[in-house]
Amino acid sequence: HPRPPPVRPRPLRVSPFHARQSRLGAHFLEGGGWERPHWYEANAPLAASLTLPSRDAWSATHWSPAAAAEARATRERVALYDMTPLRRLEVTGPGALGLLQRATTNNVAKKPGAVTYTLLLDEAGGILSDLTVARLADQHFQIGANSPADLDVLLRAAPDDVLIRDITAGTCCVGVWGPLARDLVQPLTRDDLSHQGLGYFRTRRTHIGEVPVTAMRLSYVGELGWELYTTADLGLRLWDTLWEAGQRYGVVAAGRSAFDSLRLEKGYRAWGHDMTSEHTPYEAGLGFAVRMDKGDFTGREALLAHAARGEPARRLTALTLDDRAAVVLGHEPVYVGGRPAGYVTSAGYGYTLGRCVAYAWLPPLAPGTPVHIVYFGEKTAATVAEEPLFDPQMTHILT
């Protein structure tokens, strides 16, 4: 199964919110040693009013209708997500900006308060990781990373005047997302969190109640909201403050299952699933994160060579399953014109769209092209879709 939880050693790493999550009936799976809630049994009654297709035993493993309720609550009200397992690196020193400019693809030479989505590449132009780089001060950056390999790459490239630390264990993060996110958070702080006060991909230090936080206006689920970071010792107070204030808005705790559904609908890539070092940014649909005019960076020459050869021969492609009741889970073969042509990377049911969404590596295909995904030996019809599937005008986020 694609989500087999290890038996031991568990629990190994838990966020400061673990006791509250357990009280809500969290179903934990493991990632990077962290206990990660995938859904909460407390939300199961909310799913009773939803019409969901029945699932086969395989796709129903490590799944609950509660995930659908959590996704709906995120789209319609507001939800809290534990983002603590997101690896966090701190990069400081006089040479910090120069290091990040040379090591990553996007232009991070922005004023303090800016957050930049960028990529780490190898010399062949393959994607080693995708990062969010927040410039907190002139010589102080916080990076959202994926794996220990990201730290290793940066350490190897760092000059003597740069200090890089993994700060994950001493910090935590709550994602607050949904159309009522600002109604929940704004009364808890003296700072202006309006769209004008803190725009998309901007960050500032503020307080939520008594808790000092670094607030980043980011959204991996396609809804208004923030990632709120604080130290681990204050994490429980942060969660409780948000939870208590959110009761009047119907706040729910939401897990990774709903998170994956929402990000697939929005077309956000997951490194290690949708792209790896075998793929270039242009193949993966991430060309917007590459600034070829900013100067030299690792992988730049390889990208120029790729561009000289013309359009990529494969692309990460969005698919929707034709049968609204059909579900695939990822890593299935995809057939085009009756012949195997690629494979699914990640997939999940899109509760807002009312059908399963899959991403697959395929030859370039026009939207509307019919394909088939093979699931347990049966060909399931799917159609190439135009991205993004949800909220192409970004009205849910830019508000």
Image (cartoon, helix red, strand yellow):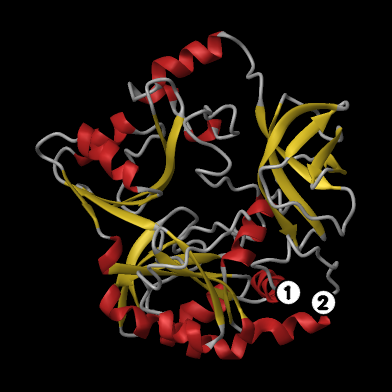
Image coordinates for residue 252, horizontal then vertical, percent: 59, 81
Q: Which residue occupies the extreme top position in the image?
A: 308
Where on the picture, by quarter, is residue 385? top right
Foreground residue, 5 or 305?
A: 5
Image coordinates for residue 59, horizontal then vertical, percent: 73, 60
Q: Is residue 106 above or below residue 141?
A: above
**In-image side of 277 versus 309 (left or right):** left
Tell me the SS state at disc 2: loop
Which amino acid, by three-letter code, is at mark 2?
A: Leu
Which amino acid, by three-letter code, is at mark 1?
A: Pro
The answer to whether the residues at label 1 and label 2 have Cβ atoms under 8 Å apart is: yes
Q: Which residue occupies the extreme left position in the image?
A: 160
Image coordinates for residue 79, horizontal then vertical, percent: 58, 75
**In-image side of 235 versus 52 (left or right):** left
According to the image, label 2 marks what residue?
A: 50
According to the image, label 1 marks what residue?
A: 65
**Residue at screen point 37% across, 21% down:** 123
Q: Earlier in the sequence, mark 1 or mark 2?
A: 2
Tell me the SS state at disc 1: loop
Q: Disc 1 to disc 2, how far (Cα)?
A: 9 Å
